[in-house]
């Protein structure tokens, strides 16, 4: 009877954490992919020039520092900026702008996961752009396409197809490293599993079932990326 009650409680708790994990993963993956395509396009095209340097710095920062450090800086460090700004705003008769620098655990997780994922996506997109033969640029310009039109209608669609497998891998990584959100007090799947296992000292069963939840998320993400790949398949392009 006790076993049945424990598993009923465990699944109820894990389900709550699972849905918060989904709420973190879905927007982070979506924003990260959009950021990656935009940043990768600018860096691959090397245009506009004034954006290339700052975007290279952004990618180097988020690829070169630990994700956990980024989370801690966002969740614990930004409120310090808010505490510094609020007295200044009050003295100037302005609204307390420092409150914008006090993210919740959920907001900090989505923001950092999106930016970090976007930095890695941009490298896949940039590499795919550089792999496209220069003759296509020349042919498009000879047909009267502007540089922006060439990238928007010819280069970027090909680059996204070529980078799709790498982008899919990054989303799978995102699903797994979303578990770090529990270190900034987000009550997602791993945090709930930690809480239940520490309460009942049933670590093996708890984390085995939590692992199955992550496996299910990865399986669904893999299936979705495969479906999109088939929908985008072009006869004569790639394996299709």
Image (cartoon, rainbow, N blue to C red):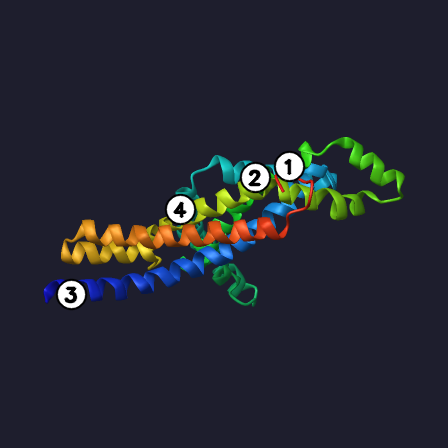
Q: Secondary structure at mark 4?
A: helix
- Crowd rating for badge 4 (residues with CA inside 10 Å; few <14, some 14–19, many 20+): some
Q: Nearer the viewer, residue 25 or 39?
A: 25
Between the residue at mark 4 and the residue at mark 2, the CA separation in whole angstroms equals 18 Å
Asked whether the residues under the numbered discs 1 and 4 touch, taking CB atoms below 8 Å apart as contact, a structural biologist would say: no
Horizontal placement of 39 versus 196: left or right?
right
- Residue 97 is tagged as none
- N-term-proximal mark, 4 vs 2: 2
Viewer-nearest of labels 2 and 3?
3
Task: Residue under label 3, please give it.
Answer: 4
- N-term-proximal mark, 4 vs 3: 3
Task: Residue under label 1, please give it.
Answer: 128
Quarter of the image for the N terminus: give it. Answer: bottom left
Using the rendered view, name the quadrant where residue 145 is placed: top right
- Crowd rating for badge 2 (residues with CA inside 10 Å; few <14, some 14–19, many 20+): many
- Residue 177 is tagged as 4
- Crowd rating for badge 3 (residues with CA inside 10 Å; few <14, some 14–19, many 20+): few
- N-term-proximal mark, 1 vs 4: 1
- N-term-proximal mark, 2 vs 3: 3
User: Going 64% across and 38% down the picture, which residue do you hit?
Assistant: 238
Q: Secondary structure at mark 3?
A: helix
Viewer-nearest of labels 1 and 4?
1
Viewer-nearest of labels 2 and 1?
1
- Crowd rating for badge 1 (residues with CA inside 10 Å; few <14, some 14–19, many 20+): many
Vertical relation: 100 (above or below) 155: below
Task: Residue under label 2, please give it.
Answer: 59
The location of residue 179, given as percent across then percent down, is 36, 50
Horizontal placement of 133 versus 24: left or right?
right
Between the residue at mark 2 and the residue at mark 1, the CA separation in whole angstroms equals 16 Å
Horizontal placement of 187 versus 204: left or right?
right
The location of residue 95, given as percent across then percent down, is 54, 67
């Amino acid at each position: 009877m006790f076993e049945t009650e424990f598993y009923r409680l465990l699944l109820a708790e894990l389900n709550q954490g699972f849905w918060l994990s989904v709420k973190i993963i879905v927007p982070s993956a979506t924003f990260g992919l959009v950021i990656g395509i935009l940043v990768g396009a600018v860096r691959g095209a090397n245009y506009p020039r004034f954006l290339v340097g700052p975007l290279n710095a952004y990618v180097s920062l988020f690829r070169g520092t630990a994700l956990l450090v980024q989370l801690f800086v966002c969740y614990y460090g930004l409120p310090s900026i808010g505490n510094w700004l609020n007295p200044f705003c009050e003295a100037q008769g302005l609204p307390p702008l420092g409150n914008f620098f006090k993210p919740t655990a959920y907001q900090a997780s989505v923001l950092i996961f999106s930016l970090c994922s976007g930095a890695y996506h941009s490298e896949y997109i940039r590499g795919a752009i550089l792999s496209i033969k220069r003759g296509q640029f020349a042919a498009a310009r000879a047909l009267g396409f502007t540089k922006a039109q060439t990238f928007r209608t010819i280069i970027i669609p090909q680059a996204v197809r070529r980078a799709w497998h790498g982008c899919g891998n990054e989303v799978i990584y995102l699903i797994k490293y979303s578990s770090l959100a529990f270190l900034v007090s987000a009550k997602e799947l791993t945090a709930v599993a930690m809480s239940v296992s520490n309460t009942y000292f049933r670590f093996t069963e708890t984390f085995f079932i939590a692992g199955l939840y992550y496996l299910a998320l990865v399986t669904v993400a893999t299936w979705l990326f495969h479906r999109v790949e088939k929908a985008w398949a072009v006869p004569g392009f790639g394996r299709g």
